[in-house]
Image: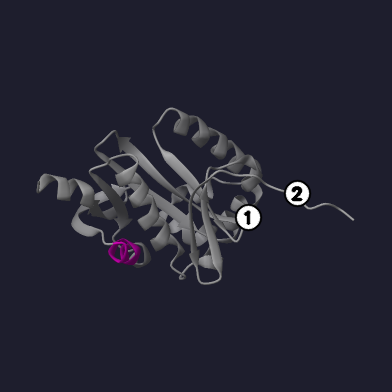
Amino acid sequence: MPQEKIHYYFSLIHFQLDDLDIHLVMPQSWQAIDLYQAIAHDRVSLGKWLPWAYQMKSAQDEASFIQTIQEKMIKDRMVVLTILVNGEPSGMIDLHNLVKNQKGEIGYWLSSTYQGRGIVTNSVLKLCQYAFSELNLQYVDLIVAVENGKSARIARNADFKLMGMKKNLINDNLDGQIFRKINPIRINQSDL
C-alpha cells in the first residue's frame, strides 16, 4: 500500500468558512503542480486580469516562480502566501510594493472551484489585519480593473473605500480603480 506524502508548511493565517479549512501559508515547491493545474484550468478568466497566467506554461514555471518569490520575501520586499483550501493549494494572495511602516498593495487569485464562497474576501481581511498589526502599515491598496466587478465587490466587502480611477493603471492598457483601507489602529492613535 503506497504511503501518502505528508506536506509540512508554515501557516501564517488560518480560518474556517463553513466546511472549508483555509490556511494562508508560505509558498513551497510541493505546491507548484496543484497551483499550475488551477492556473491552466482558469487561464482565460485569470488572463483577462492577470496577463502572467499566459506565461505559466508548466509546473516547473510555477516552481521557478515560487523560488523567485521566496528570495524576494527574504529581502523584505513582499509577503506572498499560498491559499490552501482543505489542504489543497488553490490560489495565492500577496502584499507587495511594501514601503516600511507606510503602505502596501494586495493582489490575489483563486481557483474557480472555490470562488464565490468568501475565501478571498476573508483572506484579504486577515492579510490586512496582519499588515496593520505586524507590519504597522498606514494603509493597504487594492488595484482593480474597472471592468472587474468581482474584485471590486471583494474590495467593498472587505471595507476598502474607492479612492479614484486612473487610465491605463493596469499593465498599461486597463483602466484601474484604487481602493484603500486605512489602518484603524493608526486612526485611533491620532485621536489621542
Drawn side of residue 159 relative to residue 41, left or right: left
Q: Tell me which residue sits at (56%, 46%) in the image.
A: 56
Q: Tell me which residue sits at (62%, 47%) in the image.
A: 31
In this view, the residue in front, 176 or 124, is 124
In the picture, the quarter occupied by the N terminus is bottom right
Residue at image mark 2: 5
Q: Tell me which residue sits at (30%, 52%) in the image.
A: 143
Label 2: few (<14), some or many (≥20) within 10 Å?
Answer: few
Q: Is residue 155 magenta?
A: yes
Mark carried by residue 37: 1
How far is mark 1 from mark 2, CA to CA? 19 Å
Drawn side of residue 56 relative to residue 171, left or right: right
In this view, the residue in front, 170 or 94, is 94
Q: Is residue 133 visible?
A: yes
Which quadrant holds residue 67? top right
Number of numbered callouts drawn:
2
What range is drawn magenta here?
152-158
Mark carried by residue 137: none
Q: What amino acid is at disc 2?
A: Lys
- Our reading of the magenta stretch's main secondary structure is helix
